[in-house]
C-alpha cells in the first residue's frame, strides 16, 4: 500500500514538474489604445446546451448555497435526503420530498461568446452578477468532465503564460471549481482584446451540479470591488479591466428576456430599453461579509397587488445568475394567500395552477415605487400542463431578499460600478 502511494506520488509530481517547466513570469495587462466607446452584447443560444430534468429541490437550494444563506427547515431536510437517501425508490415519501416535482432547467441555455488566446479558442460563457471569478473548463481536467464542451488549452495559444504559483477555488450554489491560473488574451463578443487577463483553468469540479450545466464552458463573474478567489494574489476580473481601459462610463446594464436572448450593455445606458425614471440606490455592504462585492441594496418597503405599502426595509441581492426570487416567509405567505390554489411541495417550494391570477409586487426605492408584473411571477410551467412553479420562494424571516432572473426579465438594471449604486427601471 505504501508502495502504491509512493508510485502515485511520483507520477503526479512529474505531471506538475512538466507544467512548471512551461511557466513564465506574470505578463502585464496591455493598456487599451483604442478610443473609449460602449459595448452592446447580445446573448446567443448555446449550441451545446441539452435539456435535462432536475429536481426542484436542487433549484430551490441553489441560491441558499451560493449566498451562504440558512435554508428553511423543509428545504434543508429535502436537501439532506437528496444527498444521503435512496431517492430512486419512486414510491417512497423521501423520493417525493427530495426530488420535488422534476422540471427542465434552463440554466446555461443562453450564453455569451468569449474567445481566449491566439489563435482564438471560443467558449460559451455564462455571465453572473452574483460571483466574481472568470474560469473555464480546461485541458487540465479529466476527460470524463470535458465531453460535450469546448475546452481551453493554454498550450495552444501563443499569448498564454502560466501564472506560477497562482491557483483558484470558487464556490457556487451549483458546486465549486478549482485549478490553476494562466494569463491570456480575452475577447468578449469580438470586442476589445484584453491581454494578460487572468484565466482560471479548472482542474476539477466539486459536486455534480456544474456538470449539469450542459454545454456551458465557463463562468464570467461580474461582482465588483472585490478580488476573485485566486490565491495567493486575488485579482480583479475582465469587468474592471474593460472599465479602466475602454468604457466611456464605468457601468453596465442588464436586460434579460424570458425564453429569449437578453442583452448586456457596457459603458452606456440605452434609453430605448426602459420606461420612466431610473431609480438609483447605493450598494450597501453585506453585514457579515463587508468585502464581498455583492450587488446588494436596500429597498424601502413593499406592497402586494393593490395592498397598502409596508415601510419595512429589506436588504436585496441582485443576481442575474439565480433562477428564483427569494422573499422572507411573511412576505411570501402574504403573496401566495392571494393566489387561488397555491400550495407548497413538502420541500417548501410554492406552486400554483397556471390559470390563477397573479398579483403584482411593488417595491420601494427611497420614496419611489417600482412594480413587477404578474407575468414575472412564474418560474417555469410543470410538464403536467396544469401547474406552475412560483418565481417567488420563501427564505428565513431575518434573511435577505434575492432578485433573480424571473423579475430581472421585467426590469432594466443599471450596475453603476463607478458610483457604487444600482438603478432600477421598468422595461419597455
Ligand atoms: C420504497 O418505499 C416504500 C415506501 O416507503 C417501501 O414500502 C418499499 O419497500 C420501498 N421499496 C424499495 C425497493 O426499497
Ligand atoms: C493541448 O495542446 C497541446 C499543443 O497543441 C497538445 O500537445 C496537447 O495534447 C493538448 N492537450 C489536450 C489535453 O488536449
Ligand atoms: C486586488 O487585486 C488588485 C490587482 O488586480 C491588487 O492590486 C489588490 O491588492 C488586490 N486586493 C486585495 C485585497 O487582495
Ligand atoms: C440599509 O439597511 C440597513 C438595515 O436596515 C441599515 O442599517 C443601513 O443603514 C441601510 N443603508 C442604506 C445606505 O440605506
Ligand atoms: C411589514 O412587513 C414585515 C416584513 O414582511 C412584517 O414583519 C410586518 O408584519 C409587516 N407589517 C404589516 C403592518 O403588515
Image (cartoon, rainbow, N blue to C red):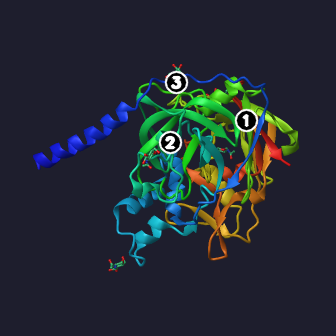
How packed mark 3 is, by other alpha carbons closer than 10 Å (few <14, some 14-19, many 20 or more), is some
Q: CA distance from mark 3 to mark 1?
A: 27 Å
The residue lying at 46 percent from left, 55 percent from top is: 146
Q: Secondary structure at mark 2?
A: helix
Q: Residue 311: image x %, image y %?
A: 72, 38
Q: Secondary structure at mark 1?
A: strand
- Give the labeled residue for mark 3: 27
Badge count: 3
Q: From the viewer's perspective, is residue 294 above or below residue 355?
A: above
Disc number lying in front (2 or 1): 2
Q: Does residue 309 appear in the picture of this structure?
A: no
Q: Secondary structure at mark 3?
A: loop
| Nearest the eye: 27 or 409 | 27
Asked if the residue at tag 1 contacts the one at tag 2, i.e. Cβ–Cβ closer than 8 Å, the answer is: no
Q: Does residue 238 appear in the picture of this structure?
A: yes
- Give the labeled residue for mark 1: 252
Q: Is ligand 2 closer than 8 angstroms to the Cβ of mark 2?
A: yes
| Nearest the eye: 113 or 420 | 113
Q: Residue 415: image x %, image y %?
A: 71, 34
In which quadrant of this rendering is ligand 4 seen? Answer: top right
Q: CA distance from mark 2 to mark 1?
A: 32 Å
State which quadrant residue 279 falls in. top right
| Nearest the eye: 252 or 408 | 252
- Give the labeled residue for mark 2: 156
Q: Is residue 363 left or right of residue 111?
A: right
Q: Is ligand 3 closer than 8 angstroms to the Cβ of mark 1?
A: no
Q: Earlier in the sequence, mark 2 or mark 3?
A: 3
Q: Residue 396: image x %, image y %?
A: 53, 47
Amino acid at each position: 500500500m505504501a508502495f502504491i502511494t509512493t508510485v502515485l506520488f511520483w507520477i503526479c509530481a512529474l505531471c506538475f514538474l512538466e507544467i512548471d517547466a512551461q511557466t513564465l513570469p506574470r505578463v502585464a495587462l496591455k493598456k487599451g489604445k483604442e478610443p473609449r466607446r460602449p459595448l452592446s452584447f447580445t446573448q446567443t443560444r448555446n449550441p451545446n446546451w441539452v435539456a435535462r430534468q432536475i429536481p426542484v429541490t436542487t433549484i430551490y437550494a441553489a441560491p441558499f448555497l451560493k449566498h451562504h444563506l440558512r435554508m428553511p427547515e423543509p428545504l434543508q431536510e429535502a436537501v439532506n435526503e437528496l444527498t444521503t437517501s435512496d431517492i430512486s425508490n419512486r414510491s417512497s415519501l423521501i423520493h417525493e420530498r427530495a426530488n420535488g416535482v422534476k422540471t427542465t432547467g434552463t440554466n446555461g441555455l443562453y450564453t455569451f461568446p468569449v474567445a481566449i488566446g491566439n489563435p482564438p479558442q471560443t467558449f460559451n460563457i455564462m455571465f453572473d452578477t452574483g460571483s466574481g471569478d472568470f474560469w473555464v473548463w480546461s485541458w487540465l481536467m479529466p476527460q470524463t468532465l470535458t465531453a460535450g464542451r469546448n475546452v481551453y488549452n493554454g498550450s495552444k495559444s501563443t499569448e498564454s503564460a502560466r501564472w506560477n504559483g497562482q491557483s483558484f477555488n470558487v464556490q457556487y450554489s451549483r458546486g465549486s471549481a478549482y485549478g490553476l491560473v494562466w494569463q491570456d488574451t480575452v475577447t468578449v463578443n469580438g470586442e476589445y482584446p484584453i491581454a494578460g487577463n487572468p484565466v482560471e483553468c479548472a482542474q476539477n469540479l466539486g459536486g455534480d451540479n456544474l456538470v449539469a450545466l450542459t454545454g456551458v464552458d465557463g463562468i464570467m463573474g461580474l461582482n465588483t470591488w472585490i478580488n476573485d478567489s485566486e490565491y495567493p494574489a486575488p485579482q480583479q476580473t475582465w469587468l474592471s479591466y474593460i472599465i479602466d481601459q475602454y468604457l466611456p462610463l464605468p457601468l453596465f446594464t442588464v436586460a434579460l428576456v424570458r425564453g429569449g436572448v437578453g442583452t448586456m450593455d457596457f459603458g452606456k445606458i440605452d434609453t430605448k430599453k426602459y420606461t420612466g425614471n431610473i431609480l438609483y440606490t447605493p450598494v450597501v455592504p453585506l453585514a457579515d461579509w463587508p468585502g464581498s462585492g455583492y450587488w446588494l441594496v436596500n429597498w424601502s418597503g413593499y406592497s402586494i397587488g393593490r395592498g397598502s405599502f409596508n415601510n419595512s426595509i429589506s436588504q436585496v441581492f441582485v443576481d442575474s445568475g439565480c433562477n428564483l426570487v427569494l422573499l422572507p416567509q411573511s412576505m411570501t405567505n402574504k403573496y401566495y394567500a392571494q393566489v387561488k390554489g397555491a400550495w407548497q411541495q413538502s420541500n417548501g417550494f410554492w406552486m400554483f395552477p397556471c390559470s390563477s391570477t397573479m398579483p403584482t409586487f411593488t417595491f420601494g426605492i427611497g420614496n419611489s415605487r417600482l412594480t413587477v408584473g404578474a407575468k414575472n411571477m412564474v418560474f417555469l410551467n410543470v410538464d403536467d400542463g396544469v401547474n406552475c412553479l412560483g418565481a417567488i420562494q420563501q427564505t428565513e424571516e431575518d434573511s435577505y431578499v434575492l432578485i433573480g432572473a424571473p423579475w430581472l426579465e421585467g426590469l432594466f438594471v443599471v450596475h453603476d460600478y463607478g458610483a457604487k449604486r444600482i438603478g432600477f427601471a421598468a422595461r419597455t
